[in-house]
Amino acid sequence: MTRFIAISPQSQCWLFNIALALNILGMMLTDMWLPMVVGAIITTYLSVDAWVRLRYVIPMKKEIRELRHELEQARKEVRDSCQ
């Protein structure tokens, strides 16, 4: 999930959603259906991927990091109490 690390996840979400809107607008305004449909499918995937990362994956990674820290503290306390 570290494909696009040059910009923040929030910016990625906005960028991909705007690209999707532009693709849909282009489908309505032009006769180039096949390239626009392919572009819309790709930007839909990127938009959903960015939204899922922003909404679920990043907070989950933060929570896992906190749980690992708590686990290390608990292990340290158990080792200290046993010695």
Image: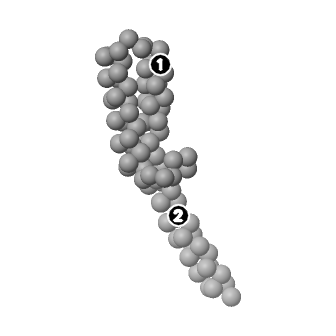
Q: Left or right of 69: which side holds 27?
A: left
Name the amino acid type tagged 1: Pro
- Residue 81 sits above or below residue 49 on the image: below
Q: Residue at x 47, y 60 (%)?
A: 62
Residue 25 lies, in percent from the top left, at 31, 23
Residue at the farthest right position:
83
- Residue 59 sits above or below residue 46 on the image: below
Q: Residue at x 58, y 81 (%)?
A: 77
- Residue 32 sits above or below residue 73 on the image: above
Q: Left or right of 26: which side holds 3?
A: right
Q: Residue at x 57, y 75 (%)?
A: 74
Determine the CA span between mark 1 and mark 2.
42 Å
Disc ID at residue 65? 2
Disc ID at residue 82? none
Q: Work out whether mark 1 precedes mark 2 in sequence or the reverse, and give the earlier one.
A: 1
Q: Residues within 10 Å of mark 2 (few under 14, many from 20)?
A: few
Name the amino acid type tagged 2: Arg
Q: Which residue is mark 1?
A: 35
Q: Residues within 10 Å of mark 1 (few under 14, many from 20)?
A: few
Q: Residue at x 40, y 37 (%)?
A: 16
Q: Nearer the viewer, residue 3 or 36?
A: 36
